[in-house]
Image (cartoon, rainbow, N blue to C red):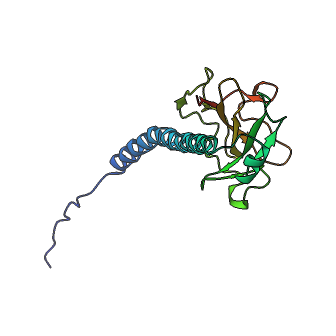
Amino acid sequence: MKKYPLSRQKGFTLAELLIVVAIIAVLVAIAIPIFRKNLEKSREAYDIYTMRQAASAAIELYYAGVTNSASASAVGLSWWGTEGNANANAYGAYDPSGKFYPSRDALPANAKKYGKGTTLDGGTTFVMGNSRGAYASNYDYTNAVVMVSIYPNAAKPYVLVYWKNNVSGDTTYVGGQQSTSIPKYSIQININ
């Protein structure tokens, strides 16, 4: 009987496999935070896009003649204050489909809270008409909706766009308020 020598099998040793697994683990550990930050940036970009769309739609309503309670009601907005008063305004909740509602409660069920940004800071900054900024990337927007106020009788008419929480018991501005009924973070667009 002829004996054949054992041939050496080619393959990886256990040490080589452990090194490869360790390298992959390090790469994954580096990639996950980068991926999360980029994902958060896209969420914040969506929120800012929604604010800009709401501002554009509100400006169109101003130019369409929303200047009193009757015209505000006709386009689905509420009215606050005495007509002709500089602080009187048309206000409402914005649905990302492009429609306004007189209050947050009147929004359709799928639009009761549509913000995407979380407390993870994606580093997005957006300043428009407000020295504090229009969007604070380190706040949670997931339970919030965009609100719009049109001030047609102000000395310089303007539109204010901001985020407000929309969960039972929490109806505060996202990021807090600057003063009574004025959000800290908002888009303010002077019309004339």
Q: Is residue 8 above or below residue 155?
A: below
Q: Is residue 30 above or below residue 133?
A: below
Expressed as whole percent of the image width and height from the top left, the position of residue 114 reads 65, 50
In this view, which residue lies farthest toward the top? 131
Q: Residue at x 29, y 53 (%)?
A: 12
Residue, x 16% and y 72% (percent of image)? 3
Question: Which one is in front, 105 or 150?
Answer: 150
Farthest residue, direction left: 2
Q: Residue at x 21, y 60 (%)?
A: 8
Residue at 79% across / 44% down in the picture?
69
Camera-side residue: 52 or 138? 52
From the viewer's perspective, is 134 left or right of 79? Answer: left
- The quarter in which the N terminus is drawn is bottom left
Snapshot quadrant of residue 84:
top right
Asked if residue 29 is positioned above or below residue 130 in the image, the reply reads below
State the image coordinates of residue 5 (x, y, percent, origin top left): 17, 66
Q: How many numbered marks appear?
A: 0
Image quarter (top left, top right, bottom left or bottom right) of the C terminus: top right
- Nearer to the camera, 49 or 58: 58
Q: Nearer the viewer, residue 15 or 102?
A: 102
Quadrant in the picture for residue 128: top right
Image position of 190 (left or right of 66): left
The percent coordinates of residue 104 (x first, y second) are 77, 49
Where is residue 85? Give x, y as percent.
Answer: 80, 29
3 vs 133, left or right, is left
Asked where in the image residue 62 lies, by quadrant, the reply is: top right
